[in-house]
Image (spheres, grey):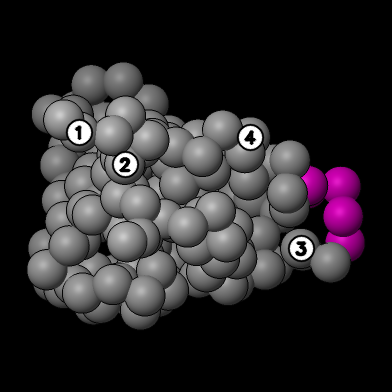
């Protein structure tokens, strides 16, 4: 019989609007693009979605609770550091990554050249193999706010397993 506490699943979602004079950072990778994303930190929607999924799986709230945008300490913060901190909270509860599956929704820019580095960055921050991390990118075929080039969003699902 499987122990019900052996596995935990979490879902995360994040969105940021485009802004001028900001770097575009996704999955900890600086993307060559004319616009960046507006946010208190580096506005990395992919890492924020994964962080929320990790915290949600452990019923620890969301990244806003742990790293509030009202705290100057997190202004322009590197979201890879925040992701690592979220994973450390998961680890402290005795869990590890089984897998991460994430999707970035962006009409532009084209992200496929960057997804392998994103996977590696996420795996390193979460002390797992890149084989346990999936990063996909898609468009909304010109529909919605991402299709209108107003911003980017990301969804993430994580499966955690209890360390034995």
Disc 4 from disc 3: Cα separation: 17 Å
Mark 1 / mark 3, whichever is N-terminal: 1
Q: Which quadrant would the C terminus be assigned to in this image?
A: bottom left
Q: Earlier in the sequence, mark 4 or mark 3?
A: 4
Tell me which segment is drawn in magenta. Answer: 68-72
Give the left or right position of residue 62, taking residue 66 as reference: left
| Quadrant hosting residue 53 | top left
Q: Nearer the viewer, mark 2 or mark 3?
A: 2
> Is 70 covered by the magenta stretch?
yes
| Mark 4 surroundings within 10 Å by alpha-carbon count, few (fewer than 14), some (14 through 19), many (20 or more) | some
At x 34% / y 68%, what residue is drawn?
122
Front-most of residues 89 and 133: 89
**Can you say whether 127 is above or below 59 in the image?**
below
Q: Give the labeled residue for mark 2.
A: 6
Q: Earlier in the sequence, mark 2 or mark 3?
A: 2
Q: Quadrant of residue 7?
A: top left
Q: Looking at the picture, does residue 138 appear above or below residue 144?
A: below
- How crowded pointer 2 is (Cα within 10 Å; few <14, some 14-19, many 20+) is rated as few
Identify which residue is drawn at 35% across, 60% down: 163
Give the residue number, with chain letter if any, for mark 4.
61
Q: Position of residue 69 (x, y in %)?
A: 78, 48
Circle 3 residue:
74
**Image coords of residue 26 (percent x, y):** 38, 62
């Amino acid at each position: 019989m499987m122990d019900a506490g052996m596995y935990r699943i979490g879902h995360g979602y994040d969105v940021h609007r485009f802004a001028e004079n900001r770097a575009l950072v996704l999955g900890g990778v600086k993307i060559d693009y004319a616009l960046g994303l507006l946010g208190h930190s580096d506005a990395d929607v992919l890492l924020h979605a994964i962080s929320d999924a990790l915290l949600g799986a452990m019923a620890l709230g969301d990244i806003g609770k742990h790293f509030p945008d009202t705290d100057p300490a997190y202004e322009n913060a590197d979201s890879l550091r925040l992701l690592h901190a979220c994973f450390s909270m998961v680890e402290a509860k005795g869990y590890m990554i089984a897998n991460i599956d994430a999707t970035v929704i962006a009409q532009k820019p084209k992200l496929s050249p960057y997804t392998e580095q994103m996977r590696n960055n996420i795996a390193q921050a979460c002390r797992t193999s890149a084989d346990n991390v999936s990063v996909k990118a898609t468009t909304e075929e010109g529909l919605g706010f991402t299709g209108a080039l107003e911003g980017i969003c990301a969804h993430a699902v994580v499966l955690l397993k209890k360390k034995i």
